[in-house]
């Protein structure tokens, strides 16, 4: 097939490198911060040392690039063949923090491994699964996920999760820098166009990082010690990391995997409709979910949190109509090359918590908006849907914010229902099954 610029608007075909590389880089810039933020947040809460952080960030770039290639160019039934970008899922941050603080990072990896296998298998039954998990359930879960993350974002702005007793927590410098990042992102997203709008999160972090350097808040010792070249290490070669399996960790992780499966369905459908102007096929949908599960399994082999499709890149495709797989491949290859330069990971790891907080606070809140979009996809929220959402939020968020109310219940119950998504998911599922559908009919009369 001819190599020409016009192919950027076609799924197949080659695009000249001078055009493909900057277009591919645009996708990398759109997801770069989001891909690394979950690991920065979780590793910060668990107080992992700088050396391990750098390795994990390095591995996150490698895995994201690799699984994006698999998604673009399917192997067997793994991959949709659509222009989808993969990366570390922020949806697992709250459950990872909860599990990690109780049972260690190994429990996160063990639960992620089993969850990835489960999601891969779900790909074989994706059509009936869409009927079992309607938007009233999945939208509620995603909404609760976002709300439960917001306090974590605020704590990062203050100086770090769990550091409220630190005398420097909430320092004026932290608040000012976090606010600068927050406002820069909003301004660029609202008023800028093209590259500046798409890369608003990355640019906001860069601005905040520069200000933090001026304030003398950045420690460059880790950057100086990091090597210029290194091969990504599998989990068994990373000091202190391994797999452990706890039922209290596995169950909530499986529930989040169900939510991210639905997110993957939505992202890939959005790519097909918004970018290609057609419905997604069953084979593409099956391949997308297989790739999601497979990618998460591979991620754990490198000590990285689960992978999923990135919604911001879906929006980029829908906006630009650039759907060429070769273009996205150049971005994926660049991402993998970055993984072999540890100094890049060390620079990212040196970003102060307040800078990261200004960005992730907005990112976390946007997850809630994704949930609302699912709930309002058919128009106004019905009385039945509103009742399910309200009850689910009350149970999920109520128990997670006041776990002491469960102190006389079994420890396994406290561990699972102390996480907002578990109580929310269980409540939404039960109410969706028992509340009569004729409530909808009454409203329409």
Image (cartoon, rainbow, N blue to C red):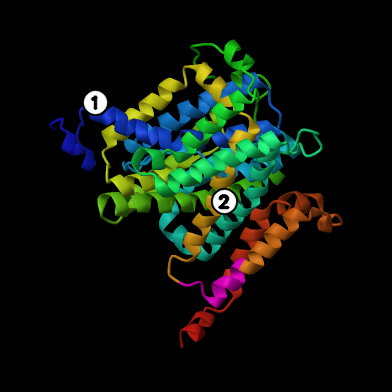
The quadrant holding residue 90 is top right
Q: Which residues are magenta?
A: 380-389
Among the two numbered marks 1 and 2 on one chain, the one whose residue lies closer to the N terminus: 1
Circles 1 and 2: CB distance less than 8 Å?
no
In the displayed orientation, state which residue is furthest to the bottom: 445
Under circle 1, the secondary element is: helix
Residue 158: % across, % down: 70, 39
Front in this rendered view, residue 141 or 180: 180
Would you place residue 174 above or below residue 396 in this image? above
Residue 114 visible in this rendered orientation of the protein: no
The quadrant holding residue 330 is top left
In the displayed orientation, state which residue is furthest to the right: 408
Residue 267: % across, % down: 41, 50
Q: Badge 1: few (under 14), some or many (20 or more) residues near its Cα, within 10 Å?
A: few
Under circle 2, the secondary element is: helix
Q: Where does label 2 land, which residue?
A: 365
């Amino acid at each position: 097939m001819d190599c020409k610029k016009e192919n950027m608007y076609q799924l197949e075909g080659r695009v000249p490198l001078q055009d493909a590389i900057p277009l591919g880089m645009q996708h990398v810039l759109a997801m770069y911060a989001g891909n690394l933020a979950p690991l920065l947040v979780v590793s910060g809460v668990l107080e992992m040392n700088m050396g391990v952080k750098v390795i994990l960030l390095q591995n996150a770039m490698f895995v994201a690039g690799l699984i994006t290639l698999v998604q673009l160019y399917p192997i067997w039934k793994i991959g949709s063949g659509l222009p989808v970008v993969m990366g570390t899922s922020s949806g697992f941050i709250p459950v990872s923090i909860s599990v990690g603080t109780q049972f260690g990072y190994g429990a996160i990896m063990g639960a992620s491994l089993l969850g990835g296998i489960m999601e891969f298998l779900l790909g074989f039954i994706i059509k009936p699964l869409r009927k079992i998990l309607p938007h009233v359930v999945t939208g509620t879960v995603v909404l609760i996920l976002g709300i439960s993350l917001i306090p974590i974002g605020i704590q990062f702005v203050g100086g770090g999760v769990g550091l409220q007793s630190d005398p420097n927590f909430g320092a004026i410098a932290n608040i000012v820098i976090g606010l600068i990042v927050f406002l820069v992102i909003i301004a660029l997203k609202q008023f800028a166009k093209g590259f500046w709008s798409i890369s608003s999160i990355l640019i906001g972090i860069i601005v905040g990082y520069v200000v933090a350097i001026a304030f003398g808040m950045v420690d460059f010792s880790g950057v100086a010690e990091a090597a210029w070249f290194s091969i990504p290490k599998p989990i068994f070669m990373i000091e202190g990391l391994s797999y452990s399996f706890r039922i209290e960790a596995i169950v909530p992780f499986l529930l989040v995997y169900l939510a991210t499966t639905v997110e993957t369905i939505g992202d890939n459908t959005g790519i097909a409709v918004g970018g290609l102007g057609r419905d997604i096929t069953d084979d593409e949908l099956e391949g997308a979910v297989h790739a999601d599960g497979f990618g998460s399994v591979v991620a754990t082999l490198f000590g990285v949190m689960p992978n999923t499709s990135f919604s911001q890149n879906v929006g980029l495709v829908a906006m630009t109509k650039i759907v060429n797989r070769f273009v996205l491949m150049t971005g994926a290859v660049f991402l993998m090359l970055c993984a072999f330069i540890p100094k890049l990971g060390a620079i990212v790891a040196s970003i102060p918590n307040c800078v990261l907080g200004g960005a992730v606070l907005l990112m976390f809140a946007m997850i809630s908006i994704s949930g609302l979009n699912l709930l309002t996809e058919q128009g106004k929220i019905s009385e039945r849907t509103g009742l399910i959402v309200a009850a689910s939020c009350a149970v999920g968020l109520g128990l997670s914010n006041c776990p002491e109310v469960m102190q006389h219940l079994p420890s396994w119950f406290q561990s699972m229902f102390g996480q907002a998504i578990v109580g929310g998911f269980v409540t939404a599922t039960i109410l969706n099954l028992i509340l009569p559908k004729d409530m909808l009919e009454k409203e329409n009369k």
